[in-house]
């Protein structure tokens, strides 16, 4: 547990992401260890981490530009794509996962209107 916290803190703050990816980020096994998950959550919550920084926002119609911007490495922070309908956001996320064969886009978020949850997208 002690050695896991610095790694999680680095990932949460965006520092040393290469090391984070090399170590892996699959912690699904924690669901079977609710006691450990609760302890880990309390320690992470105590770090008072700032929310992620949004670097640039695109509208859905500009999705190709958003992906180009993201892939260029020119920007800093998260790239947010806004859509008007929650169902569209769910479709976008599903298509991205399918097209990239599970590739994770940790710096690309899909934003939906407030109060309209999108099938698994928060």
Image: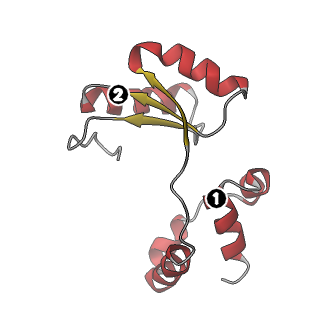
Q: Is residue 24 visible?
A: yes
Q: Position of residue 63 (x, y in %)?
A: 48, 18
Count of marks overlaid on the render: 2
Q: Mark 1 points at which residue?
A: 13
Mark closer to the chain start, 2 or 1: 1
Residue 83 placement, left or right of 45: left
Q: Which of 32 and 89 is in front in this view?
A: 89
Single out the mark in the foreground, 2 or 1: 1
Q: Name the residue under label 2.
A: 91
Q: Is residue 31 above or below residue 22?
A: below
Return the mark for residue 104: none
Residue 95 placement, left or right of 115: right
Q: In this view, does 102 lie above or below 49?
A: above
Mark 2 residue element: helix
Residue 76 figure quarter: top right
Q: Residue at x 45, y 81 (%)?
A: 38
Q: Which residue is drawn at 68% across and 25% down?
A: 71
Residue 122 placement, left or right of 62: left
> Quarter of the image containing the N terminus?
bottom right
Q: Position of residue 31 (x, y in %)?
A: 45, 72
Q: Which residue is drawn at 28% across and 41% down?
A: 119
Q: Which residue is drawn at 66% across and 75% down?
A: 5
């Amino acid at each position: 547990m002690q050695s896991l916290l610095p790694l999680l803190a680095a990932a949460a703050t965006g520092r040393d992401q290469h090391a984070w990816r090399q170590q892996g980020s699959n912690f699904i096994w924690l669901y079977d260890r609710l006691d450990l998950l609760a302890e880990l959550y309390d320690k992470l919550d105590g770090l008072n981490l700032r929310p992620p920084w949004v670097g640039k926002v695109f509208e859905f119609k500009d999705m190709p530009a958003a992906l180009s911007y993201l892939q260029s490495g020119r920007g800093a922070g998260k790239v947010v794509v806004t859509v008007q309908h929650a169902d569209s956001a769910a479709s976008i996320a599903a298509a991205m996962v399918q097209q990239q064969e599970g590739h994770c886009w940790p710096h690309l978020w899909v934003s939906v209107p407030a109060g309209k949850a999108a099938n698994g997208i928060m």
